[in-house]
Amino acid sequence: MKTLWLSLLLTLTFAWGGYSVGQTFDIATLSDQNNQKVSLAKAQKIMVAFDKASYYDMDQFLATKPNFLQTHTIAFINDISAVPSAIVKLFIQPAMKKKSYPILLLKDSEASKKLDYREGKITIYSLKRGKVVKIEYIDSQKIGDYFK
């Protein structure tokens, strides 16, 4: 009976998608706002913004903290997979090119399904040797409090 429940749980986890603690974070590289490939291999934390408001809150925070992402070994991903590519090329990417920090752009909707979206939240994956050890959901307006 325990085996049946375990099999059901694993099947549901696979069907729902999304990373969970213990899984390997297998999005290995992404392009940044300048179309440069960036490896996620050394990242200890992956921070993901899924909507415009969350991205804006992260931008406001990072604008006051030069080299914050590099110093803390954090990769910042902006999930733009739902945005039409013409909008990305004409408006979003040009605006992001002015930023002094790397913004990794997730354009692949299949890869996006692996990430856990919560409205108004930044999803933070803590990694150890590429495996997810912790998942947190932080109110994007309180991101500064998270790092105090």
Image (cartoon, helix red, strand yellow):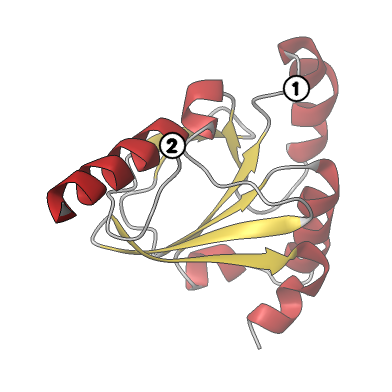
Task: Farthest residue to the front: give it.
Answer: 1
Which residue is the site of mark 2? 17
Across and down, in percent, residue 80 comes to 68, 30
Q: What residue appears at the point 22 percent right and 50 percent down from the top-left corner?
A: 6
Looking at the image, tell me whether mark 2 or mark 1 is earlier in sequence order: 2
Gap in Å between the C-alphas at discs 2 and 1? 21 Å
User: Residue at point 59% right, 25% down?
Assistant: 107
Of the numbered discs in the image, which one, if any, rests on residue 83? 1
In which quadrant of the rendered view does residue 126 lie?
A: bottom left
The reply to whether discs 2 and 1 touch (Cβ–Cβ < 8 Å) is no
Q: Looking at the picture, tell me which residue is in the foreground, 147 or 101.
A: 147
Q: Residue furthest top?
A: 86
Q: Position of residue 40 (x, y in %)?
A: 38, 47
> Which amino acid does the dot numbered 2 rest on?
Gly
- Does residue 28 appear anywhere in the picture? no
Question: Could you tell me the amino acid type at mark 1?
Answer: Val
